[in-house]
Amino acid sequence: MQEDIVEAGNSICNIQITVSDDENAAYICIAPPSEGTENTLESVLKLAKDVGVVHGISTEVISNILDNNIYNRTLKFAQSTPAIDGQDGWYEFLFDTHIDTRPKILKDGSVDYSEYGSVPSVVEGERLVVYHPPTPCKDGINVFGGSILAKKGKDLAKIKGKGFAIDSTGTEYTAKYDGKVTYIAERLVVDKELVVEGDVSFTTGDIEFQNDIHIRGNVFSGVSVTSQKGSIIVDGYVEQANLSAKNDVVLKNGMQGNGKGSIEAGGSVKGKFFEQSSITCKGDVQANAIMNTRIEAGQDIIVSGKYGVIVGGSVSAMRYISANIIGNMSEVRTEIKAGVDGDLFALLAQCKQNKEDSEKSLKTVVDALEKVQQALSKGDNPELSKKRIQLMRSKIECDTRVNELTKREQEILDQMGKANLAKITINKVVNPGTAITINGVKVLVTEENHHVEYARRGAGIIVYNIGE
């Protein structure tokens, strides 16, 4: 606290004025005046001015002290005008940005895909986001009349993404076209989505679209549906059709392929059931039942639910397979494979050797190209110019080959990592007639096994109980 004691005329007024350290408040304490003297509002105000207190003074407080002889009590008589900080700018999203597209797990363990794909849809010109700019700030004044600096509101950067337009004021974001909208990792994205309200059949013909395809009805036999860069979602059933997507394929019901239906996905494949179909994907396959189907999954195959059965056909996963029941009492031939069939170490060694050879060839071409360019810098030579073009083409070919082998080497390493984790889990029963293969080692199940797990150990396969 800052303290001042002053004299008025020939007598000590015994008035103390103190100011808080932050200079936001001033306090006064008046002692009884000596005989023959009198404190007045004017004299107190003059004293306050003399010590520098000039702002936010309450004459009512001072008058009350003097009129009611309130002595030897410290009371606040001046208060600063506080600064008003500006509020930061903020974005108001006009759609739900927190979307959970994970399918629901029901009480019996089965998966309900009915809500999958419920990402907000928008139409062209629809408002998506409104930007509220920062509010202005206002400086305050302390009791000495000095400025209290206010904090300016922070202006936010424009949202990045695609598929939207920003108005001239920079405050309204609208959809450029019909599609679905997401805001993930601070990116606003409107993806074009093809929505087929009914069925896909001979009447509609094949469908091919760059981005996501959402079919509200069924997909009947004899047609193809292709998403070049997105996913495919089918609300109804799929018959003997061919589905191909860069990302995921999700069937909210299932597929009866009649031996000819197929699915190919760069991501995962999910559905209630798959029967007499063929599935190839780089991600997982999830279902409640798989019957007489051929599957090659780049990661896991998870079959869950009340039945959670795999019966007939051949299913293969790079890493992990889990089901409640595999095979049936009739001993239908069922092939279950986890891991890889070939020798990945041999593949990796061959890939590294090929890459090394290609890198040597690339170096030879680069060295030759440098010599030709040095010679050409000394003068034009048609033969050397022709040679330079040939070497440039060879360099591009060698570069491409090296890049392809580098990518393949990484793919093999990824496969090795997954294959090391390969195992097959049966939560209830595996029936005779089931052939189990893990990383190239095969065993045939000859009797029922309950609650077991199969894994590769050394040159063989071990079986151990996992409990109910």
Image (spheres, grey):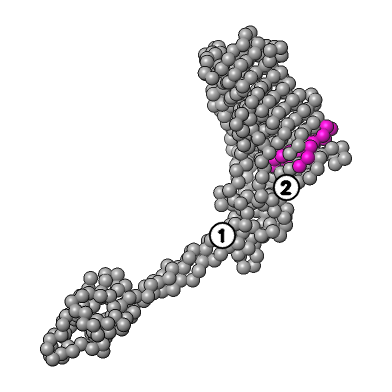
- First in sequence: mark 1 vs mark 2: 1
Compared to residue 32, the image places residue 349 above or below, namely above
Alpha-carbon neighbours of circle 1 within 10 Å: few (<14), some, or many (≥20)? Answer: some
Quarter occupied by residue 366? top right
Q: Nearer the viewer, residue 46 or 240?
A: 46
Q: Is residue 332 magenta?
A: no
Residue at 27%, 82% (x, y): give it: 64
- Which residue lies under the disc numbered 1? 91
Q: Which mark is residue 327?
A: none
Residue at 37%, 75% (x, y): give it: 81
Q: Which residues are magenta?
A: 216-234
The x, y position of residue 25, in whole percent, is 30, 74
- Which structural element holds mark 1? strand
Amino acid type assigned to the residue bearing label 1 in the image:
Tyr
- Quarter of the figure that contains the C terminus: top right
Compared to residue 291, the image places residue 143 above or below, namely below
Pick out the residue farthest to the top: 446
- Which structural element holds mark 2? strand
Compared to residue 372, the image places residue 164 above or below, namely below
